[in-house]
Image (tube, rainbow, N blue to C red):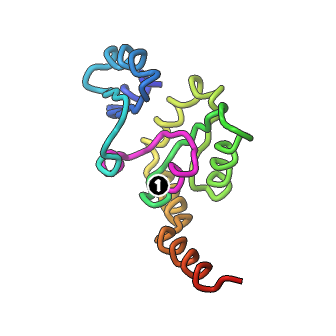
Amino acid sequence: ALDKIENEGAFVLWQTGKLYNEECQAIAKRHPGVVKAVPFISDMALAYRAADIVVSRAGAGTISELQLIGLPVVLIPSPNVAEDHQRKNAEALVQCDAAVMILDADAREKLGDEVVALLGDEKRCNLLAENVRRMALRDSDEVIVDTIYKILNNPK
Protein backbone atom coordinates (compact mmCIF):
# COMPACT_ATOMS: atom_id res chain seq x y z
CA ALA A 1 0.00 0.00 0.00
CA LEU A 2 2.88 2.38 0.67
CA ASP A 3 3.83 2.75 -3.01
CA LYS A 4 0.28 3.86 -3.89
CA ILE A 5 0.07 6.19 -0.91
CA GLU A 6 3.50 7.66 -1.69
CA ASN A 7 2.38 8.42 -5.25
CA GLU A 8 -0.40 10.57 -3.77
CA GLY A 9 2.11 12.71 -1.88
CA ALA A 10 0.90 11.58 1.52
CA PHE A 11 3.03 11.09 4.62
CA VAL A 12 2.57 7.98 6.77
CA LEU A 13 3.20 7.79 10.51
CA TRP A 14 3.27 4.07 11.21
CA GLN A 15 3.00 2.72 14.75
CA THR A 16 4.49 -0.74 14.41
CA GLY A 17 4.60 -2.15 17.92
CA LYS A 18 7.79 -3.68 19.31
CA LEU A 19 7.30 -7.08 17.72
CA TYR A 20 7.22 -5.80 14.12
CA ASN A 21 9.36 -2.70 14.48
CA GLU A 22 12.53 -4.04 12.88
CA GLU A 23 10.69 -5.42 9.85
CA CYS A 24 8.67 -2.24 9.45
CA GLN A 25 11.74 -0.02 9.80
CA ALA A 26 13.28 -1.85 6.83
CA ILE A 27 10.12 -1.23 4.80
CA ALA A 28 10.00 2.44 5.84
CA LYS A 29 13.60 2.93 4.68
CA ARG A 30 12.44 2.15 1.14
CA HIS A 31 10.16 5.23 1.40
CA PRO A 32 12.43 7.97 2.84
CA GLY A 33 10.66 11.18 3.70
CA VAL A 34 7.29 9.50 3.23
CA VAL A 35 7.05 6.86 5.96
CA LYS A 36 8.07 7.28 9.58
CA ALA A 37 7.90 3.95 11.43
CA VAL A 38 7.98 4.00 15.21
CA PRO A 39 7.35 1.23 17.72
CA PHE A 40 5.08 3.43 19.86
CA ILE A 41 3.51 6.87 19.62
CA SER A 42 3.54 8.47 23.05
CA ASP A 43 1.56 11.57 22.05
CA MET A 44 -1.48 10.20 20.22
CA ALA A 45 -3.27 13.54 20.53
CA LEU A 46 -0.57 15.15 18.41
CA ALA A 47 -0.62 12.27 15.92
CA TYR A 48 -4.39 12.53 15.56
CA ARG A 49 -4.20 16.32 15.07
CA ALA A 50 -1.69 15.79 12.26
CA ALA A 51 -3.75 13.06 10.57
CA ASP A 52 -6.14 13.39 7.66
CA ILE A 53 -7.05 9.69 7.70
CA VAL A 54 -6.47 6.99 10.31
CA VAL A 55 -5.83 3.34 9.50
CA SER A 56 -6.24 1.26 12.63
CA ARG A 57 -7.17 -1.97 14.32
CA ALA A 58 -10.62 -1.95 15.89
CA GLY A 59 -10.26 -2.49 19.62
CA ALA A 60 -12.87 -0.88 21.86
CA GLY A 61 -10.49 1.71 23.34
CA THR A 62 -9.29 2.73 19.91
CA ILE A 63 -12.85 2.95 18.59
CA SER A 64 -13.74 5.28 21.48
CA GLU A 65 -10.77 7.52 20.69
CA LEU A 66 -11.62 7.58 16.99
CA GLN A 67 -15.20 8.57 17.75
CA LEU A 68 -14.04 11.44 19.93
CA ILE A 69 -11.52 12.80 17.44
CA GLY A 70 -13.83 12.43 14.45
CA LEU A 71 -11.44 11.58 11.63
CA PRO A 72 -12.14 9.37 8.62
CA VAL A 73 -10.94 5.90 9.48
CA VAL A 74 -10.15 2.64 7.76
CA LEU A 75 -10.46 -0.20 10.25
CA ILE A 76 -8.60 -3.47 9.84
CA PRO A 77 -9.89 -5.72 12.62
CA SER A 78 -7.36 -8.11 14.08
CA PRO A 79 -8.34 -11.71 13.34
CA ASN A 80 -6.35 -12.82 16.40
CA VAL A 81 -8.73 -11.73 19.15
CA ALA A 82 -11.38 -13.49 21.20
CA GLU A 83 -14.75 -14.02 19.55
CA ASP A 84 -13.82 -11.83 16.57
CA HIS A 85 -14.81 -8.79 18.65
CA GLN A 86 -12.76 -6.30 16.62
CA ARG A 87 -14.68 -7.23 13.50
CA LYS A 88 -17.95 -6.65 15.35
CA ASN A 89 -16.67 -3.27 16.57
CA ALA A 90 -15.73 -2.28 13.02
CA GLU A 91 -19.03 -3.50 11.58
CA ALA A 92 -20.92 -1.31 14.06
CA LEU A 93 -19.19 1.75 12.60
CA VAL A 94 -19.54 0.59 9.01
CA GLN A 95 -23.30 0.14 9.47
CA CYS A 96 -23.49 3.83 10.46
CA ASP A 97 -21.31 4.89 7.52
CA ALA A 98 -18.76 6.03 10.09
CA ALA A 99 -15.79 3.94 8.91
CA VAL A 100 -14.46 1.75 6.15
CA MET A 101 -13.53 -1.83 7.02
CA ILE A 102 -10.98 -4.00 5.28
CA LEU A 103 -10.44 -7.51 6.58
CA ASP A 104 -6.89 -8.35 7.59
CA ALA A 105 -6.68 -11.03 4.91
CA ASP A 106 -7.55 -8.43 2.25
CA ALA A 107 -5.41 -5.56 3.54
CA ARG A 108 -2.38 -6.06 1.29
CA GLU A 109 -4.60 -6.07 -1.78
CA LYS A 110 -7.14 -3.36 -0.87
CA LEU A 111 -5.65 -0.91 1.65
CA GLY A 112 -3.65 1.23 -0.77
CA ASP A 113 -6.56 1.72 -3.14
CA GLU A 114 -8.92 2.56 -0.28
CA VAL A 115 -6.59 5.12 1.29
CA VAL A 116 -5.89 6.72 -2.10
CA ALA A 117 -9.63 6.88 -2.82
CA LEU A 118 -10.26 8.59 0.51
CA LEU A 119 -7.39 11.03 0.03
CA GLY A 120 -9.05 12.11 -3.21
CA ASP A 121 -12.61 12.32 -1.87
CA GLU A 122 -13.04 15.18 0.59
CA LYS A 123 -16.82 14.78 0.63
CA ARG A 124 -16.58 11.10 1.64
CA CYS A 125 -13.96 11.89 4.28
CA ASN A 126 -16.15 14.63 5.76
CA LEU A 127 -19.15 12.29 5.88
CA LEU A 128 -17.17 9.52 7.60
CA ALA A 129 -15.72 12.01 10.08
CA GLU A 130 -19.12 13.51 10.87
CA ASN A 131 -20.76 10.11 11.32
CA VAL A 132 -18.03 8.67 13.53
CA ARG A 133 -18.04 11.85 15.65
CA ARG A 134 -21.81 11.49 16.18
CA MET A 135 -21.27 8.05 17.69
CA ALA A 136 -19.01 9.36 20.47
CA LEU A 137 -20.13 9.02 24.05
CA ARG A 138 -18.78 12.27 25.39
CA ASP A 139 -18.07 12.48 29.11
CA SER A 140 -18.52 8.72 29.46
CA ASP A 141 -15.97 8.70 32.28
CA GLU A 142 -18.18 11.04 34.30
CA VAL A 143 -21.28 8.95 33.56
CA ILE A 144 -19.48 5.84 34.83
CA VAL A 145 -18.35 7.58 38.03
CA ASP A 146 -21.83 9.02 38.62
CA THR A 147 -23.34 5.55 38.18
CA ILE A 148 -20.88 4.05 40.66
CA TYR A 149 -21.70 6.76 43.20
CA LYS A 150 -25.42 6.11 42.77
CA ILE A 151 -24.93 2.39 43.34
CA LEU A 152 -22.74 2.97 46.39
CA ASN A 153 -25.13 5.52 47.90
CA ASN A 154 -28.27 3.46 47.26
CA PRO A 155 -27.39 -0.12 48.22
CA LYS A 156 -30.27 -2.57 47.95
Q: Which residues are magenta?
A: 47-66
Task: Identify whether 154 is placed above or below 37.
Answer: below
Residue to which mark 1 is pinned: 65
Count of marks, rendered view: 1
Dividing the picture into quarters, in which one does residue 41 lie? top left
Residue 9 vs 144, above or below: the answer is: above
Q: Name the amino acid, label 1.
A: Glu
Figure quadrant of the C terminus = bottom right
Closer-to-camera residue (51/140): 140
* Left-right relation of 149 to 47: right
Q: Residues within 10 Å of mark 1 (few under 14, many from 20)?
A: some
Task: Out of 24 and 156, give the one closest to the viewer.
Answer: 156
Q: Residue furthest bottom?
A: 154
Q: Residue furthest left?
A: 33
Residue 146 rendering spot, x and y as whole percentages: 52, 78
The answer to if 53 sits in the magenta stretch is: yes
Is residue 33 within the magenta segment?
no
Residue 30 position by quadrant: top left
Lateral position of residue 49 relative to residue 129, left or right: left
Q: Residue furthest right?
A: 83
Image quarter of residue 6: top left
Reply above or below: 80 against 151.
above
Please report the residue visible at 39 percent of the width from the left and 31 percent of the height from the top: 14
Which residue corresponds to the image point at 32% horizontal and 42% vertical from the top-left? 42
Q: Give the image location of residue 106, x and y in percent.
A: 64, 27
